[in-house]
Image: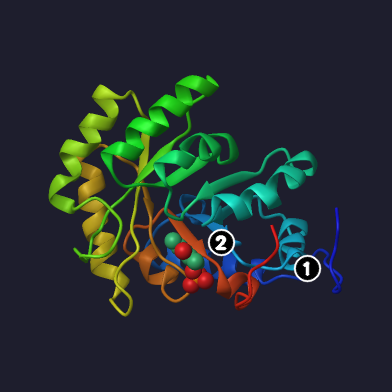
């Protein structure tokens, strides 16, 4: 385990504070804190901050880039075998095999070509991984994600034709939008497709998302501090 300039040790991170905020938001909504999973978004964070969050007991992390995750997590897995690493960034079909090797959960399934590539990758590796479908709840032209009106057909294609396990729905609402209606909408889409997990809510709005039904919140900067603008070496 390598530690950077700063000392990284138990009690050094904001983890306890974030967990308290999650528990309070859940309680306000009459939900148990255990119904909400914190995904610590570690993209572009320096190693010492990640070490501190690991030392404080966090085991579920989200990464945006296949290459950055490949450089970071295999070494940690030797020390922490119970790690669960989620891919929350865009995935190219030609990296499906790498992603299926590296990640425990892939949250950004957003098109049929990628579904086919992941099904092939799982077959080749002899293991499948739970998938979340990314939904473009804001209907933004440039944004990744399945259009809400195409979701039901895509879910049955993934399940019936490809044998994929669809465990959740994920959304990144338009910048500046209130997360509440997006969460409620995502919940209705999930319910009618028999999907249980809802990944929505980030540093600025995770408490609201929890009040409206989020089961997985993706928190980066509020937990680790602001991301460094320069590229972190892999
Ligand atoms: C970076 C990122 C996050 C975390 O954002 P913060 O505002 O730092 O909490 C969550 N989800 C996705 C998809 C991201 O890319």
Task: Answer above or below: position of 39 versus 75.
Answer: below
Q: Looking at the image, is mark 1 or mark 2 earlier in the sequence?
A: 1
Pick whichever, 21 or 76, lies toward us. Answer: 76
Q: How many marks?
A: 2
Picture colour scheme? rainbow
* Image-quadrant location for residue 152: top left
- Label 1: state its secondary structure: loop
Residue wearing tag 2: 41
- Are the residues tagged 1 and 2 within 8 Å (C-beta)? no
- Label 2: state its secondary structure: strand
Can residue 25 be seen in this snapshot? yes
Q: Is residue 48 left or right of residue 41?
A: right
The disc label shown at residue 110, or none: none
Q: Is residue 154 left or right of residue 2?
A: left
Pick whichever, 31 or 210, lies toward us. Answer: 210
**Residue 123 in picture, x, y percent from top left:** 46, 20
Between label 1 and label 2, give the one nearer the viewer.
Answer: 2
Q: Residue at x 78, y 39 (%)?
A: 78
**Residue 234 in picture, x, y percent from top left:** 69, 57
Task: Respond yes or no on whether mark 2 lies under 8 Å from ligand 1.
Answer: yes
Task: Respond yes or no on whether mark 1 lies under 8 Å from ligand 1.
Answer: no
**Residue 60 in picture, x, y percent from top left:** 60, 50
Residue wearing tag 1: 11
Q: Residue at x 63, y 69 (%)?
A: 231
Q: Residues within 10 Å of mark 1 (few under 14, many from 20)?
A: few
* Image-quadrant location for residue 90: bottom left
Work out how far the residue at label 1 is from the one at label 2, CA to CA, in angstroms.
18 Å
Q: Is residue 25 left or right of residue 79?
A: left
Q: Residue at x 51, y 34 (%)?
A: 97
């Amino acid at each position: 385990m390598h530690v950077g300039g700063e000392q990284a040790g138990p009690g050094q991170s904001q983890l306890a504070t974030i967990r308290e905020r999650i528990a309070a938001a859940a309680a306000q909504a009459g939900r148990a804190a255990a119904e909400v999973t914190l995904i610590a978004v570690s993209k572009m964070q320096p190693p010492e901050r990640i070490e501190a969050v690991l030392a404080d007991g966090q085991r579920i992390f989200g990464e945006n880039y296949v290459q950055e995750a490949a450089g970071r997590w295999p070494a940690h897995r030797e020390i922490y075998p119970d790690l669960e690493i989620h891919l929350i960034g865009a995935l190219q079909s030609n990296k499906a095999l790498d992603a299926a090797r590296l990640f425990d959960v892939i949250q950004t399934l957003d098109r049929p070509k990628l579904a086919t590539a992941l099904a092939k990758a799982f077959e080749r590796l002899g293991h499948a991984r739970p998938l979340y479908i990314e939904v473009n709840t804001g209907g933004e032209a440039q944004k990744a994600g399945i259009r809400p009106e195409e979701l039901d057909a895509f879910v049955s294609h993934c399940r019936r034709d490809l044998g994929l396990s669809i465990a959740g729905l994920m959304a990144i609402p338009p910048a500046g939008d209130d997360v509440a209606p997006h969460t409620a909408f995502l919940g209705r889409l999930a319910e009618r497709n028999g999907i249980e997990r809802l990944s929505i809510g980030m540093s600025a709005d995770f408490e609201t998302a929890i009040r409206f039904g989020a089961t997985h919140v993706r928190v980066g900067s509020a937990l680790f501090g602001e991301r460094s603008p320069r590229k972190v070496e892999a």
